[in-house]
Amino acid sequence: MSSLAAPLILADMKTPRLPIALQQAMMRSLRHFLQLASEKLERHFAEPTLVYQQRGTAAGTAWLEKWEIRLNPVLLMENQQAFVDEVVPHELAHLLVWKVFGRVPPHGKEWKWMMQEVLGVPARRTHQFEIASVRAQTYPYRCGCQQHHLTVRRHNRVLRGESEYRCVRCKSLLTPGDYSPA
């Protein structure tokens, strides 16, 4: 990969086009934290690939074997500074921990150490972003005791007769529709 620009990989045409300045800000953040890690750990790390095709409510994910960070372009557009300050180092820490310690719990003591002591960023496991713009459509289902919301994938499995779902509380079969107490 060229050191001048990261490729923009789009999952589909619904993905927003990211301004080049925003992509450059992500690369500056990545390089800044990678340099910090290299200096503090006295070790060279290759630059991971940044891919803008994370979907759903996750801000980002680290793909260890691919040495890749996937960022959610919708949440990135809505939370630009937080991605620079928190999301990029969070995902980079996962990659660095994998290189230094091997397979360990994702947000365990090694990751916390990498975040706080090496990268100088508070070790928070999850983001607090508003997710209404990326929340998937759900379908109402009911059981004997409450309302449930199934994802489109689970709803389609029910329609095709491939799956059935039960309430963990009352153990009754979920059926399409709104719950109304008796």
Image: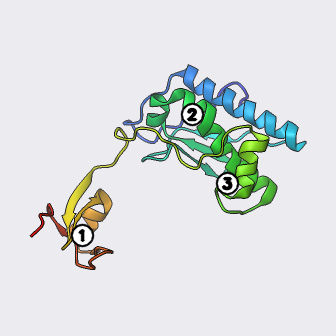
Q: Read off the residue under disc 3.
A: 64
Q: Position of residue 62 (x, y in %)?
A: 62, 49
What residue occupies the far right of the structure in this picture?
A: 42
Q: CA distance from mark 1 to mark 3?
A: 34 Å
- x 51%, y 22%: residue: 19
| Quarter in which the N terminus is drawn | top right
Q: Residues within 10 Å of mark 1 (few under 14, many from 20)?
A: some
- x 79%, y 58%: residue: 101
Amino acid type at circle 1 is Val
**Left or right: where 67 falls relative to 78:** right
Sooner in the amino-acid sequence: mark 1 or mark 3: 3
170 and 59: which is toward the camera: 170
Q: Quadrant of residue 154?
A: bottom left
The answer to whether one can see residue 46 in this image is no
Q: For mark 1, give the secondary structure.
A: helix
Q: Residues within 10 Å of mark 3 (few under 14, many from 20)?
A: some
Amino acid type at circle 3 is Leu
Q: Quadrant of residue 22?
A: top right
Q: Read off the residue under disc 1.
A: 158
Q: Read off the residue under disc 2.
A: 83
Q: For mark 2, give the secondary structure.
A: helix
| Quarter in which the C terminus is drawn | bottom left
Does the CB distance between marks 2 and 1 fall below 8 Å? Answer: no
Sooner in the amino-acid sequence: mark 2 or mark 1: 2
Q: Residues within 10 Å of mark 2 (few under 14, many from 20)?
A: many
What residue occupies the far left of the structure in this picture?
A: 182
What residue occupies the far front of the structure in this picture?
A: 182
Q: Position of residue 5 (x, y in %)?
A: 65, 26
Amino acid type at circle 2 is Phe
- x 22%, y 72%: residue: 174
Q: For mark 3, give the secondary structure.
A: loop
Q: Position of residue 66 (x, y in %)?
A: 66, 51
